[in-house]
Amino acid sequence: MSKVISIDPGKSKCGLVLAEISEKKVDEAIIIKSELLEGYVRNLNSVENISKIIIGNGTTSREITKKMDFFKKEIIIFEEKNTTFRAKSRYFELFPISGLKFLIPRDIFILNKNLDAISALIILEDYCKMKFALNQNVDFKTWLK
């Protein structure tokens, strides 16, 4: 089974999603410091069968693409317009509010959350034109420092 990496690039941090397209499942979702991204992707590439990398065309996408030159398979630059804005809605699709929390305004729940990994997921979903589910234990707020 081949996997795909989707990256929401940024100056100081990036969102990264590792997913299995044929199963429509996200295996890993992290937020990583931009300077650690290349090493992390190199490591993933050595242990996973990655068929392509999809990089959002926003902030620092050119620099990130240059850092991925070691990857000898397909690298795709894809439109990422409004993904950060859309990530708020997608967050609640993935993690619905239940119980009495439903009465509290939704924005309070994501006020301090990092949505970069969800933005990377949206880039992937837009590219594949389908929604992905989460494998067990996927935490979109995981920071790799």
Image (cartoon, rainbow, N blue to C red):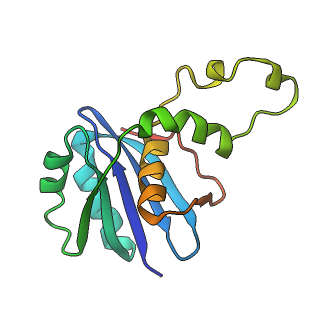
Judged from this view, the residue extending furthest toward the bottom is: 1
Judged from this view, the residue extending furthest toward the right is: 99
Residue at the spot 66% in from the left edge and 58% down from the top edge: 136
Residue at the spot 76% in from the left edge and 17% down from the top edge: 104
Q: Position of residue 31 (x, y in %)?
A: 41, 41
Q: Point out the image quarter for the C terminus.
A: top left
Q: Is residue 119 left or right of residue 68?
A: right
Label count reads: 0
Q: Is residue 143 left or right of residue 138?
A: left
Vertical side of 54 occupied by 64: above or below: above
Residue at the spot 59% in from the left edge and 52% down from the top edge: 138
Q: Position of residue 44 (x, y in %)?
A: 35, 64
Q: Position of residue 37 (x, y in %)?
A: 27, 49
Residue at the spot 69% in from the left edge and 41% down from the top edge: 95
Quadrant in which residue 25 is drawn:
bottom right
Q: Is residue 39 left or right of residue 89?
A: left
Vertical side of 19 occupied by 30: above or below: above
Q: Position of residue 77 (x, y in %)?
A: 25, 57
Vertical side of 32 occupied by 101: above or below: above
